[in-house]
């Protein structure tokens, strides 16, 4: 059995001051290739500042967040929940925009409960 990993590589910038390099063990799921992975356009989330609600999510490939693309989520092993969604973005992490207020937040990645609404 081959163990697969999801790699998170974020350059120094607004999502991570020093940059980061991590890997997460992909969770074993049934369903063949691509099972346990999906595109992410929006999530229910509460920011570090306490702003909760629906957030639009994009992968950011530049520090300003003008070069974006689809973010991806993969099921990974997590010591506290067993299995969790790891949402990954681009070279400069994730750009989150609050649907109601337009507030923007930058994150290197998100590790969310498997029950999180996408």
Image (cartoon, helix red, strand yellow):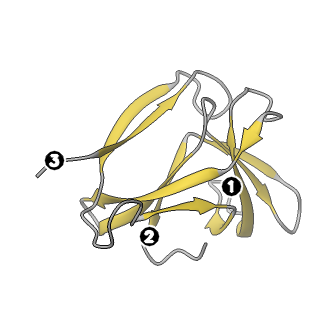
| Residue under the point 64% across and 65% down | 46
- Quick one: label 1, few (<14), some, or many (20+) residues within 10 Å? few
- Quick one: label 2, few (<14), some, or many (20+) residues within 10 Å? some
| Residue under the point 46% across and 28% down | 20
Q: Which mark is residue 108?
A: none
- Looking at the image, is mark 2 or mark 3 nearer the viewer? 3
**Label whose residue precedes the other's in the sequence (2 or 1):** 1
| Separation of residues labelled 1 and 3 (CA atoms) | 40 Å
- Side of 83 where 3 appears, left or right: left
| Separation of residues labelled 2 and 3 (CA atoms) | 25 Å
| Residue under the point 69% across and 62% down | 41
Residue 3 vertical position relative to residue 79 in the rendered view, above or below: above
Residue 23 vertical position relative to residue 116 in the rendered view, above or below: above
Give the SS element for disc 3: loop
- Side of 14 where 24 appears, left or right: left
Which residue is situated farthest in the front direction here?
A: 32
Q: Circle 2 sits on which residue? A: 113
Q: Circle 3 sits on which residue? A: 2
């Amino acid at each position: 059995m081959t163990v697969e990993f999801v790699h998170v590589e974020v350059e120094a910038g607004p999502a991570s001051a020093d940059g980061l390099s991590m890997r997460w063990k992909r969770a074993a799921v049934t369903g063949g290739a691509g099972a346990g992975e999906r595109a992410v356009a929006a999530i229910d989330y509460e920011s570090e500042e306490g702003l909760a609600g629906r957030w639009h999510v994009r992968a950011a490939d530049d520090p300003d967040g003008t070069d974006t693309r689809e973010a991806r989520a993969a099921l990974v092993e997590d010591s506290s929940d067993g299995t969790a969604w790891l949402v990954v973005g681009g070279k400069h992490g994730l750009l989150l925009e609050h649907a109601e207020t337009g507030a923007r937040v930058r994150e290197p990645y998100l590790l969310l409960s498997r029950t999180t609404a996408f």
